[in-house]
Image (spheres, rainbow, N blue to C red):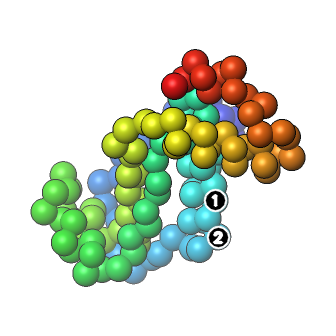
Amino acid sequence: MSLIEDLNWRHAVKAYDSSKKVSEEDLHKILEAARLAPTSSGLQPFRVIVVENQQLKERMVKGALNPEVMRDCSHVLVFAAWDSYSNEKIDKVYDHHTDVRELPRGRFSSYTDQIK
């Protein structure tokens, strides 16, 4: 399938088969896709928390729009957004980018200064 065909196929899940679980391999692919997804200024201003413990999922049911889906799914992905931006958070992200790419720290300072 092409990307456009894949996107046209998508749909909201109304129910899960509680006897089936998302494999660890597929879960890692999903998490990697979230990590690599484009975000504003490349900051990825969230953490993804994976919940697979049934007791924790039961506690989350109270806030769920569809409680049965919450109970029956194998994993719940919680996107916990930053509550605020700070110079330190922005610097930490861009220092990590430059370190991983073996570039000099401060390489993107003209851009990060604008973000700040």
Residue at 85 percent across and 40 percent down: it is 103
Residue type at the position of mark 1: Lys
Q: What's the mark number on residue 25?
A: 2
Measure how far apart labels 2 and 1 are at the Cα level. 6 Å
Residue 69: x percent and y percent? 27, 62
Regarding residue 46, the answer to whether it shows in the image is yes
Residue at 66 percent across and 39 percent down: it is 94
Which residue in the rendered view is the most extreme toward the left? 62
Residue at 52 percent across and 43 percent down: it is 89
Residue 25: x percent and y percent? 64, 70
> Which image quarter: residue 93?
top right
Residue 64 as seen in the image, left or right of residue 99: left
Mark 2 burial class by Cα count in 10 Å: few <14, some 14-19, many 20+: few
Residue 71: x percent and y percent? 26, 71
Please state the total of marks drawn on the protein image: 2
Task: Name the element at disc 2.
Answer: helix
Depth check: 7 or 48 in front?
A: 48
